[in-house]
Image (tube, helix red, strand yellow):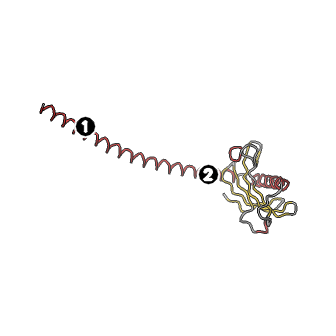
């Protein structure tokens, strides 16, 4: 669920709420004038926030490893130059503050995003069930074909044995 623009103390951001506990935030696809301004530098960034018991955080041990941030930040116009640690801390603080305030006023979005997520998971599970049922039908057909072939071979073996007994 895309949220077009949220204002932070550093500038505007965009958010994509993927479920009720995860949001991807960046200033991608905003006009160049909408880069964040940190320490008088224009900064581009992307970050994942995760809802934990104590609030929103940029750290998720499962996705990024223990204590590692999901933030990627770079100074605009300075090729391949990462933002400084000071810049990164300011970005994380501003984004979490703005997102927390936004979602406090728009909490229903968490439920709507979770519903979209669960609905998509349900569709995926249904497709997988259908694929498995189709495979099971094919396997049953193959099993029946092989069972018929085994019966025919057993019959031929019995016929051949009976011929051998008669000639002996």
Residue count near mark 1 (Cα–Cα under 10 Å), binned few <14, some 14–19, many ≥20: few
Q: Nearer the viewer, residue 46 or 100?
A: 46
Q: What numbered label is drawn on residue 154? A: 1
Horizontal side, residue 106 vs residue 141: left or right: right
Whole-percent x, y for residue 137 in the image = 39, 47
Count all numbered tags in the image, as a single digit: 2
Measure the C-alpha gap from mark 1 to mark 2: 54 Å
Horizontal side, residue 97 vs residue 137: left or right: right
Q: Residue at image x 22%, y 37%?
A: 157
Tell me the SS state at disc 1.
Answer: helix
Q: Residue at image x 83%, y 60%?
A: 10
* Residue holding disc 2: 117
> Up-down: is 83 above or below 118?
below
> Up-down: is 74 above or below 63?
below
Whole-percent x, y for residue 117 in the image = 62, 51
Residue count near mark 2 (Cα–Cα under 10 Å), binned few <14, some 14–19, many ≥20: some
Q: Residue at image x 64%, y 50%?
A: 114
Whole-percent x, y for residue 147 in the image = 31, 41
Horizontal side, residue 168 vs residue 51: left or right: left
Whole-percent x, y for residue 70 in the image = 74, 51
Q: Nearer the viewer, mark 1 or mark 2?
A: 1
Q: Quadrant of the C terminus?
A: top left
């Amino acid at each position: 669920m895309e949220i077009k623009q949220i204002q932070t103390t550093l500038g505007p951001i965009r958010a994509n709420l993927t479920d009720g506990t995860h949001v991807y935030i960046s200033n991608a696809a905003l006009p160049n004038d909408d880069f964040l301004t940190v320490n008088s530098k224009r900064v581009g960034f992307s970050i994942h926030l995760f809802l934990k018991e104590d609030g929103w955080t940029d750290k998720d041990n499962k996705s990024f490893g223990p204590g590692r941030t999901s933030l990627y930040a770079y100074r605009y116009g300075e090729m391949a130059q990462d933002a400084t640690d000071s810049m990164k801390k300011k970005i994380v603080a501003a984004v979490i503050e703005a997102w927390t305030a936004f979602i406090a006023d728009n909490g229903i979005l968490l439920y709507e995003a979770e519903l979209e997520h669960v609905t998509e998971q349900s569709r995926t599970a249904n497709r997988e069930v259908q694929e498995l049922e189709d495979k099971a039908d094919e396997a049953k057909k193959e099993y029946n074909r092989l069972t018929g072939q085994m019966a025919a071979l057993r019959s031929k073996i019995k016929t051949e044995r009976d011929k051998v007994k008669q000639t002996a």
